[in-house]
Amino acid sequence: METRVLTDGGVTLSTPVPEDVDTITEACQDPAITEWTTMPAPYARSDAVRFVGDIVPAKWARGYPDWAIRTTDGGRLCGMVGFVDRGDAGPEIGYWVAPDARQRGLAAAAVRLACDFAFSPEGMGAWRIEWRAFVGNRPSRRLLDVPDSGSRVSRDTG
């Protein structure tokens, strides 16, 4: 899959570049990011170098994009949003936002843009998107408007 830049005018999603490595490394020191994601902890600069240089291009090549969340095209990275291959279950979305960029609606806008791309026939052509979270991850739950209960929630688009 060819990389794509997505924007809604307030948020821009673009492929992370080597210049983002230090920003990613710094953001991934945040205890909330390490608690609620499956990233290595502690997160080292070498993890960010591998992510930007190897993991992201390989995922795009397999049709599972990862984007840097920015407020302007070419602007500072504020977070990440992307998809993981879950086989027949459909792609799984994941995201994080740096502490200094939270509470500004960036994650919600980025998730909307990414999901619109995933469902589009010109994008991923997905029929379903999965989202998983660790128990207690209330910020992510609120973002996706998932009820606060112990039950398993499924939202189908069809």
Image (cartoon, rainbow, N blue to C red):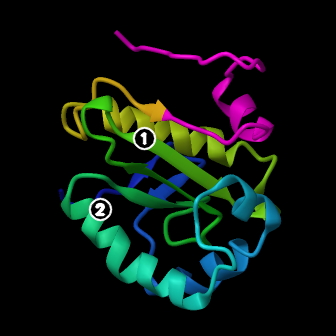
Q: How far across and down, in percent of the image, does residue 11 sit?
A: 57, 51
Q: How far across and down, in percent of the image, does residue 113 sit?
A: 46, 40
Give above or below for 6 relative to 147. Answer: below
In the orientation shown, which residue stands out farthest toward the top? 158
The amino acid type, in three-letter code, at marker 1 is Glu
User: Which numbered circle lies on residue 59?
Assistant: 2
Displayed quadrant of residue 116: top left
Task: State the count of labels.
Answer: 2
Give above or below for 37 relative to 94. Answer: below
Q: Is residue 107 left or right of residue 90?
A: right
Q: CA distance from mark 1 to mark 2?
A: 13 Å
The amino acid type, in three-letter code, at marker 2 is Lys
Q: Quadrant of the C terminus?
A: top left
**Which residue, given by chain and number where applicable, does mark 1 sit on?**
92
Give above or below for 152 relative to 53. Answer: above
* Secondary structure under the numbered disc 1 in the rendered image: strand
Q: Which residues are magenta?
A: 131-158
In the orientation shown, which residue stands out farthest toward the bottom? 46
Decide whether residue 38 is among the magenta residues: no
Most foreground residue, 53 or 18: 53
Q: How far across and down, in percent of the image, does residue 88 sit?
A: 25, 32
Q: Is residue 6 left or right of residue 107?
A: left
Choose the circle earlier in sequence order: 1 or 2. 2
